[in-house]
Amino acid sequence: MRGRARHSAGLALARTLALRLTRVRTLTPGQALTLALAWGPAGALAAGNDVLGTVTAALPRCDYEVVRTLPHRADAFTQGLALADGLLYEGTGRYGRSTLSLLDPSSGRALRERPLARGFFGEGVAVLGDRVYQLTWREGTGFVYDRESLEPVGSFRYPGEGWGLTHDGRRLLMSDGSSEVRFLDPGRLEETGRVTVRARGRPVAALNELEYARGEVLANVWQSDVLLRVDPEDGTVLGWIDLAPLRAREGRLPEEAVPNGIAFDPVSGELTVTGKLWSRLYVLRARGPGCGPLAR
Ligand SMILES: [Ca+2]
């Protein structure tokens, strides 16, 4: 009896959350309810999927210190962040308001900004060679820009949704909201393989913004404050970073304002992170044995 009561209370909570999710991300009610049942409110773990509990309980946590903060446009619905030669590239989402921007890393100010056409919801960005690549959420279309001018130079198609994007120097790596990371050839822009991200053998769903750093892939998990450290060769989750203290520093935020921007500077070893609608970018230095090569 008690079990059943708890179950229906959980279901009611999930339904409430599902209604909110349909507003936030224009999911169908069915999709939203599935996600809500899986993740629960604001990263809390709900019935049916406690894999993040396994991550945080069983795998090493990577600690960090905040080296400095930069202002971040509090109306930027951040979907992707990348750093190349000391410049930050940010992709933002929402229909009619999506952009690709080049930011001055000392001030956080936009040096250049390019809006996307109204029917495109901007997602992850990666900078490779002299090109910037940007995914879109449900439009099946990626855009290619000149890295300096941000002028569009091409586009490509892919099946399914587009969420996070990064590169390892020779391949683009993309997420699609599932537990899979796809590899794309940056020239032909076609898929060359994929890997399922698993913690202790169990898939971790809702992988979002990605960042390649010293042989590992960092991945935000949507609707949580967990940043995973992943081995991109076999998808094994190696450890995690807790971004909850940074979200707490942002004060009161709307529900959708989850962490969603990660950029690694291979020269300084610093990690710049932010979230949707956050007022700051946080520049971090990883510390301790739980960080693997990130703390080198
Ligand atoms: Ca990134």
Image: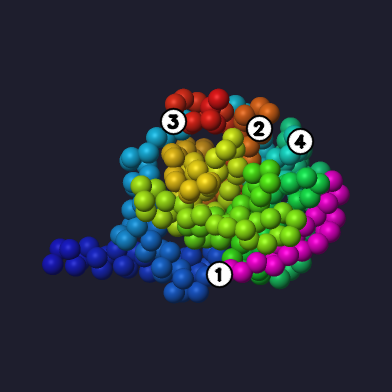
Q: Quadrant of the N terminus?
A: bottom left
Nearer the camera: disc 1 or disc 2: 2
Q: Please rate how many residues cluster around mark 3, counting C-alpha atoms within 10 Å: few if below 14, some from 14 to 19, many from 20.
A: some
Tag 4 and tag 3, C-beta contact below 8 Å = no
- Residue annotated with mark 3: 290
Dot 4 falls on a residue whose secondary structure is loop
Sequence-first disc among 1 and 2: 1
Q: Please rate how many residues cluster around mark 4, counting C-alpha atoms within 10 Å: few if below 14, some from 14 to 19, many from 20.
A: few
Q: Amino acid at mark 2?
A: Pro
For residue 38, what is the image quadrant? bottom left
* Residue 272 visible to the viewer: no
Q: Position of residue 240 (x, y in %)?
A: 45, 40
Q: Position of residue 65 (x, y in %)?
A: 53, 27
Is ligand 1 closer than 8 angstroms to the Cβ of mark 3?
no
**Residue 26's mark?**
1
Magenta stretch encompasses residue 31: no
Q: Amino acid at mark 4?
A: Asp
Q: CA distance from mark 2 to mark 4?
A: 10 Å
Q: Please rate how many residues cluster around mark 1, counting C-alpha atoms within 10 Å: few if below 14, some from 14 to 19, many from 20.
A: few
Q: Which residues are magenta?
A: 141-160
